[in-house]
Amino acid sequence: MPNELENKELIEKLPKEGVHCYPANPSKISRNRVVSAIFFIVGLFLLFYGLLKVSDNFIVKIALLVVGGLSCIISVLVFAQSFLIAKFRVAVDYNEKSVVLRYRYSKISIPFENFDGRDGTPDQAEAIIDKNFKKDTTLYLVLDDVFEDACYQTSSSDLESLDDFKQLREDCFAIAEAYGARNSKDKVKFYYEKDLEKNDTGSTDLDALIEETKAEKKADEAAEAAKRAEEQAAREAAEAAEKAAEEASEEADASESDKEDSDKE
């Protein structure tokens, strides 16, 4: 990223070392462990039932073994992940100058110079849950590597406490503002940003078309007015000429009548 995007003064205000860890919500951790344990037991039951009880139907036996095996594997993975996110779900590492988040079993690291943090919005399912089943408003935060196609979102319900979420939001906004990656011309633009550009361009083109139409209309009106003025002037000239001819004819008739009267005398 070009250095001119960075704000040296704001960078100096950021911590120079240390790691701020933000663990996952304890209730979600407990729920994941309980649910994964239940599914593990169900998976084991299906495995043993398929191995010991089903022998006459090969298709059912295979189906039970596959479903039971997958249930056990997924349960073990979810149970193990609950211990990972208990350590941290998101971390701000000032030593390595990166924002780190856990996505499944991956640790995704976003360098400060590529990072943008901004307020997020719930998807449709989350919006319905927030509206109907949650008393408190859920806040969302987008953690984005501006030069990659994918971005990630966390929420106040994902983290251990609302205070943790607010602190993470403050840290992320300060980093994004200091390093300025969000202002890069090379950043990946998402669908809504492209739509905004299209709408802006379309609006500009439409305004230009409206102005052009107005100008053409004014020109047509001016030409029509000039044409009417010429026609009016031509009519007035014709009427004046006709009137002059009538007056001349009347004068000629009167003169001829006077001459006849004079000859009779």
Image (cartoon, rainbow, N blue to C red):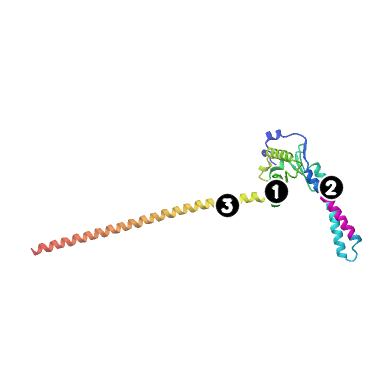
Which numbered circle lies on residue 166? none
Residue 54 coordinates in the image, percent (x, y): 89, 63
- The N terminus: image quadrant: top right
Mark 3 or mark 2: name the one nearer the start of the chain: 2
Q: Which residue is mark 3?
A: 202
Residue displayed at 16% across by 60% down: 255
Residue displayed at 90% across by 60% down: 51
Q: Which residue is mark 1?
A: 130
What is the CA distance from the residue labelled 2 to the residue labelled 1? Answer: 28 Å
Q: In the image, which residues are magenta?
A: 34-49
The crowding category of the residue bearing disc 3, from other C-alpha atoms within 10 Å (few below 14, some 14 to 19, many at least 20), is: few
Mark 3 or mark 1: name the one nearer the start of the chain: 1
Total numbered labels: 3
Residue 208 coordinates in the image, percent (x, y): 53, 51
Amino acid marked by disc 3:
Gly
Q: Give above or below for 2 relative to 35.
A: above
Q: Give above or below for 10 relative to 185.
A: above
Residue 89 coordinates in the image, percent (x, y): 78, 43
Which numbered circle lies on residue 80? 2
Amino acid marked by disc 1:
Asp
Residue 83 coordinates in the image, percent (x, y): 83, 44
Q: Give above or below for 56 relative to 188.
A: below
Residue displayed at 58% across by 52% down: 202
